[in-house]
Image: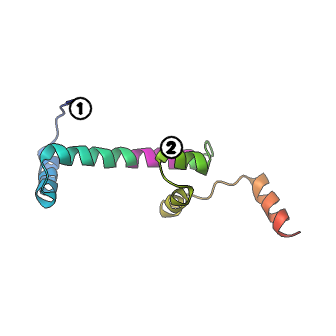
Amino acid sequence: MITISTRIDKKLLKEIEVIVKEKGIDRSDAIRQLLKIGLKEYKLEELLKSLRERKITIWKAAEIAGITYREMLDKLRAYNVPFPLTKESLISEFEETNH
């Protein structure tokens, strides 16, 4: 592991200390877990942004996020991201279901 240092304000430290006490873990473990959660959330937000802009597919977003296609669909719903269908693919699907 690599050691890094950073400055945080007292309020943030107090919140971390609450987690340390609740979880019964040391401060370093708590900070590592919080960083992991934060990075995962950041990555998800960036992927959802790319989906909104139709820069990537749902399959690709799920792959990058390390989750299943169905889990990514759940994320789209949870974050109110519209299913990224192009006008052409929507028309094609509509025509296929009406024949």
Q: Residue at x 17, y 48 (%)?
A: 12
Residue 53: where, in percent of width, then height? 60, 46
Q: Main secondary structure of the magenta part?
A: helix
Q: Amino acid at mark 2?
A: Ile
Residue 36: where, in percent of width, then height? 31, 45
Marking on residue 73: none
Please identify the quadrant where the C terminus is shown: bottom right
From which residue to which does the magenta span run?
A: 41-50
Q: Separation of disc 1 and disc 2 at Cα?
A: 24 Å
Kindly state the secondary structure of the residue where label 1 is placed. loop
Disc 1 residue crowd, few under 14, some 14–19, many 20+, Cα 10 Å = few
Please identify the quadrant where the N terminus is shown: top left
The residue at which mark 2 appears reads as: 64
Q: Amino acid at mark 1?
A: Met
Q: Residue at x 62, y 47 (%)?
A: 57
10 shown above or below 5: below
The residue at which mark 1 appears reads as: 1
Does 45 lie within the magenta span?
yes
